Image (spheres, rainbow, N blue to C red):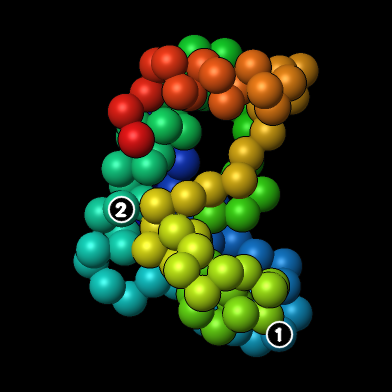
Amino acid sequence: MTLSKNFTLNELCKSQTALRLGIDNIPKDQKTISNLTMLCTHILQRVRDHYGIPFTPSSGYRSPALNASAGGRSNSQHMTGEAADIEVPGVSNYDLACWIRDNCQY
């Protein structure tokens, strides 16, 4: 399922930890999928378009079971499809965060 021009649901749900532990890490509810679509459309895709550099989120959606096994907070926005951990090659995390803050609605 495509969430934006350059991002897919599988990409946002991919987890080596989930694979290793046999955890189903695909959201079942439409609200979470909608949140992931908004995240991709309004943040990730805008970052991709602005910098023109391909990147893959290191962590996107986490099912409650995966979040617990990863030591995530019980109220992590990863579980609702509202968070992704990203790095853009050649862009400092600080500069990336400032650009998102100044140019994206979140």
Q: Residue at image x 66%, y 49%? A: 58
Amino acid at dot 2: Asn
Label 2: how many residues lie within 10 Å, few (<14), some (14-19) or many (20+)? some
Q: Earlier in the sequence, mark 1 or mark 2?
A: 1
Which of discs 1 and 2 lies nearer the camera? The answer is 2
- Residue drawn at 59 percent across, 61 percent down: 14
Q: Is 69 left, or right, of 7 in this rendering?
A: right
> Which image quadrant: the C terminus?
top left
Residue topped by disc 2 = 35
Q: Quadrant of residue 93?
A: top right
Q: Could one spot residue 45 in this view of the protein? A: yes
Name the residue rendered at 41%, 32% in the picture: 43
Q: Is residue 29 above or below residue 5?
A: below
Q: Amino acid at mark 1?
A: Leu
Please count the marks in the image: 2
The quadrant of the rendering that contains the N terminus is bottom left
Q: Is residue 17 above or below residue 9?
A: below
Of 71 and 1, the residue lying toward us = 71
Residue drawn at x 65%, y 86% is 22
Q: Position of residue 85 (x, y in %)?
A: 61, 46
- Locate residue 46, reporting x and y percent: 42, 23
Residue corresponding to mark 1: 21
Q: In terms of secondary structure, where does tag 2 sit?
A: helix
Give the CA separation, mark 1 to mark 2.
25 Å
Of 73 and 61, nearer the camera is 73
Q: Position of residue 81 (x, y in %)?
A: 40, 58
Q: Is residue 100 above or below residue 60?
A: above
Where's residue 31, x and y in %?
23, 63
